[in-house]
Structures are given as C-alpha cells and as structure tokens.
C-alpha cells in the first residue's frame, strides 16, 4: 500500500533563522522539517569556507512531545571545529525529540569545513549530504568529511562536532564542520602558511535503515514517514532565504547554504492517506487526525466506500 502525503496541506509553523537553541511542545500531526547547516567562517575575501548542507524529512509527533531545535553558525555554535587561524567550521542544524542530547537527534544538516591556506582556491570541505565533503589537500593533510558512522579523518572530531585545525611552524589548517558526525580538521606541515582545509559534517535522517550508534535513543515511532532528502553543500538545494510572499527578485535555489544555519518546520494537523488503484483513488482506509485524541480516527463507512476520480 502506497502512502501519499499531500504536501500542499503543509503550513509553516516556525522558522528559526538565528543561531542558538529553541524548544516547543508538539501538537499531534505530521511535520515537515527542513534544516540547513551553516557555512564555515571565511578567513578573508579570498579564503572562503565550505557551504552548509540540507536535510528534509517528514515525521509524526504525538501530543506533548518536547521538540528541541538547534541552529548552527560559524562562531562555534553546534559543533563547528576551530581552525588554526581562529575561525570556526560551520555548525550543524538539527532537531531533537524528547531530550536535548545528541542521541535524540532525528534530522541533521551538516556544516562546512574552513579553509586552511588563504587563497581563492577552495581548500575546504562542504557540509553533508550523507557524508561531508573532504578538505582539499594542499600542504599537510586535509580533514575528511564526516560519515554516517564516524568522524572524518585528519584531526578527528566526533559525534556531533568537527575536529580542530592546527597552528604550527607558521601554518594554519582548517577546522571541521559540525554534523551527525563532524568533519576532521586539517593538519600542517613544517613549511609555511599553505595548509589544508577541514572536512564537512555529515547530515542524517532517522529511519528504519539509518545508522544508530551505541547509546542512541531509537524509537520507531519517530522514523521518517516519507522519502527523506539529504543534499550536500556543493549541490543545488532550496534557498533558505527564499520568501514566496515577497515581491523582491529571489532565487528559489542555491548551491549550498552560504550563510548561517536555519530550521524550518511545517505542519499538517489533518492528513489523508490514499491507495491508488486502476488510475482512480479508492479510499477504503481514510482517517481523520484528531488533535484532541492525538490519533487517526476512521471516517464513516459511507465515506470509506466512496470512489474519487
């Protein structure tokens, strides 16, 4: 049986555009959550940072669920690793259910890694995606992108945070981005200020097949209920600043998130499930979502027997 969610029914519940921590009590229903990881700090006008990734998925929440929102930036909020020259990798943006811990995250967008060498060449890693991008090798070893099951190599980070960059022998390497697992920091050699960048952090969406590390709070009720989307920071994604109601000329998409993180939450208080057969929509299992009872309630037998062309 194929389940179809009518995305036209979603209405924006909240947009979190400023870095930091937020929380709210859920109303029962279907939620679409979009997260953008933060871009890393730029070292200069030519030494830029990796862009943030994007994650989108649909979940069910119950009445009274406590939801925690974390929005990353490039100043140390939510896991960005510190570069050898002082700036930070991009912090992850994520949503947590039940408790404000890394083990309660159900969706994560990874942040970008910082550059090392101060140049127009891109020596950083972008935010994830299933995996973060690797820092580009210059001198010294680059930080590698975080993955679904571990932090990137180089100067490794960990679960939720990027590795730090190094400062030695006159050289400075990049810090890793925050994420599900963070990107690794770069290392320096013994020459000059010409070293490698940090890796980007990995994105994540909780599902029946997603990786769950030891200690993770795994509750199948909160598995995503539609096909999730994870887009790396070097690819086209929805523009976090796009406003469909504005008269200003805006791009609906952007290649990677170039700014700080964002979380956008949309909500359907009522959801309809359809079974498609022979090019008609039969609805033998049609339910009304009751906010009062916090569950789906079947409609009448007469309604359930109707055929909708």
Image: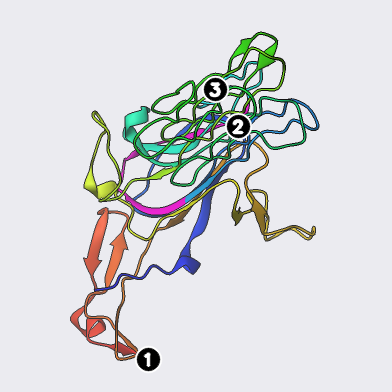
Identify the residue shown where x is 36% and y is 60%.
226
Camera-nearest residue between 149 and 139: 139
Residue 196 screen position, x and y as percent: 62, 26
**N-terminal label among 1 and 2:** 2
Q: Is residue 156 left or right of residue 252?
A: left
Local packing at callout 2 (Cα closer than 10 Å; few below 14, some 14-19, many 20+) is some
Q: Which residue is mark 2?
A: 137
In the picture, the quarter occupied by the N terminus is bottom left
Identify the residue shown where x is 37% and y is 91%.
309
**N-terminal label among 3 and 1:** 3
Q: Which residue is mark 1?
A: 309
Tell me how far mark 3 sits from mark 2, CA to CA.
Answer: 18 Å
Tell me how far mark 1 sits from mark 2, CA to CA.
Answer: 58 Å
Camera-nearest residue between 252 and 87: 87
Camera-nearest residue between 35 and 170: 170
Count numbered badges in the picture: 3
Nearest to viewer (mark 3 / mark 1): 3
Q: Give the image quarter of residue 71.
A: top right
Q: Which residue is mark 3?
A: 81
Q: How is the image coloured?
A: rainbow
**N-terminal label among 3 and 2:** 3
Q: Give the image quarter of residue 44.
A: top right
Identify the residue shown where x is 25% and y is 57%.
295
Task: Specify start and end residues of the magenta stretch as a single range.
Answer: 56-74
Q: Is residue 248 magenta?
A: no
In the rendered image, is residue 139 in sight?
A: yes
Nearest to viewer (mark 1 / mark 2): 2
């Amino acid at each position: 049986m194929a389940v179809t969610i009518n995305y036209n029914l979603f209405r924006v519940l909240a947009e979190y555009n400023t870095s930091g921590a937020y929380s709210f009590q859920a109303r029962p229903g279907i939620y679409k959550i979009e997260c953008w990881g933060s871009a890393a700090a730029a070292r200069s006008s030519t030494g830029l940072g990796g862009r943030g990734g994007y994650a989108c998925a649909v979940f069910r929440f119950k009445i009274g669920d406590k939801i925690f929102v974390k929005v990353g930036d490039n100043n140390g909020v939510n896991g960005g690793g510190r570069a050898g020259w002082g700036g930070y990798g991009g912090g992850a943006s994520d949503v947590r259910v039940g408790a404000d811990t890394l083990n309660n995250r159900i969706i994560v967008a990874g942040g970008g890694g910082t550059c090392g060498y101060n140049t127009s060449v891109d020596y950083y890693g972008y935010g994830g995606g299933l995996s973060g991008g690797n820092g580009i090798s210059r001198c010294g070893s680059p930080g590698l992108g975080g993955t679904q099951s571990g932090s990137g190599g180089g100067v490794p980070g960990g679960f939720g945070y990027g590795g730090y960059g190094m400062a030695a022998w006159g050289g400075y390497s990049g810090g890793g981005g925050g994420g599900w697992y963070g990107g690794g920091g770069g290392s320096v050699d013994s020459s000059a200020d010409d070293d490698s960048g940090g890796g980007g952090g990995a994105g994540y969406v909780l599902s029946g097949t997603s990786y769950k590390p030891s200690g993770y709070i795994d509750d199948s009720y909160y598995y995503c209920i539609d096909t999730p989307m994870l887009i790396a920071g070097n690819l086209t994604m929805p523009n976090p600043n796009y406003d469909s109601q504005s008269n200003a000329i805006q791009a609906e998409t952007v290649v990677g998130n170039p700014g700080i993180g964002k979380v956008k939450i949309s909500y359907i208080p009522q959801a309809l499930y359809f079974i498609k057969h022979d090019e008609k929509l039969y609805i033998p299992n049609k339910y009304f979502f009751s906010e009062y009872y916090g569950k789906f309630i079947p409609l009448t037998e007469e309604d359930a027997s109707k055929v909708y062309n």
